[in-house]
Amino acid sequence: MSTLRGREGQTVTLHPGLDKLQSDSKIFWIFGPVSPDLFIVESQVFRGEIITEYKGRFQGRLQLDRETGSLTVRNLTINDAGLYQLQIVSEQVTYHNFIFTVYASVPTPNIRNTLHNHSGDRRLVNGSCSVVCSVANGKEVTLSWYRGVWTLNNASSPHQADLSLPLEMKGKNSDTYSCVATNPVSNQTTKLSIEEHCLQHAGMSAIHSILILDQLIMRNVTLIVCVSLSLRLQ
């Protein structure tokens, strides 16, 4: 029994591991979500002519290699997951079984701030900044926080519609943080922006406030200098 994984939209080939079949072999591929019960490929030689039929909802997406018995499935869908069985009939009947799982591509995780003070300020409160990363859940999805290349924590659950994972940073922090969503066939990463999630003020950032204050000070200094020069010239 072989176990395979694929992603929606991909092309996958089920290989029985055979070099070359007898040219007059009858080949059958059978599929079922739980057990193989639907013939999807029937191929045989009749009066010297190879006749291959593709059946069921897979039509247009299958390609049989009669030389090796391999079956290629194009444009995978979630419903293509299940048990596949290859039957080869020559002097004797041989069977090859495959358990195939199809996954959707994991979505991109989202990061948001969770700790605001009374004025809506997102700046560090009591020297800390709290954020939460979330992602729509799916088959075997894991959500993780990383600091650089080091894993801080992770979460997974087959029973929740969404996965969420909090993170609290204390004090001034120059480390790189990222939230990563993964499943067995794909991954997506969202990097934490300290400015956006921890320093951004509702309507005005702390940096902008400092710049405006600097401009006011410069204007006052200029005004004082101008008045002083005017008095000296009188």
Image (spheres, helix red, strand yellow):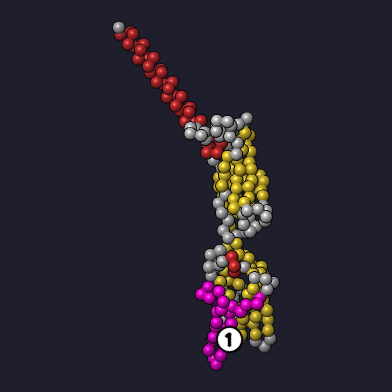
As displayed, is residue 177 above or below residue 5?
Answer: above
Give the labeled residue for mark 1. Answer: 44
Disc tally is 1
In the image, is residue 39 part of the stretch drawn in magenta? yes
As displayed, is residue 139 above or below residue 34?
Answer: above
What span is in magenta?
A: 36-64
Q: Secondary structure at mark 1?
A: strand
| Residue 79 locus on image (x, y percent) | 59, 67
Q: Is residue 220 visible?
A: yes
The residue sitting at 48% across, 27% down in the picture is 210
Quadrant where the C terminus is found in the figure: top left
Residue lying farthest front? 118
Picture quadrant where residue 139 is located: bottom right
The residue sitting at 63% across, 47% down in the picture is 164
As displayed, is residue 11 above or below residue 230?
Answer: below
| Residue 125 locus on image (x, y percent) | 60, 31
| Residue 112 locus on image (x, y percent) | 57, 42
Picture quadrant where residue 45 is located: bottom right
Please tell me which residue lies in front, 51 or 118: 118
As displayed, is residue 134 above or below residue 229?
Answer: below
Is disc 1 surrounded by few (<14), some (14 to 19) or many (20+) residues within 10 Å? Answer: some
Please tell me which residue lies in front, 114 or 21: 114
The type of residue carrying mark 1 is: Gln
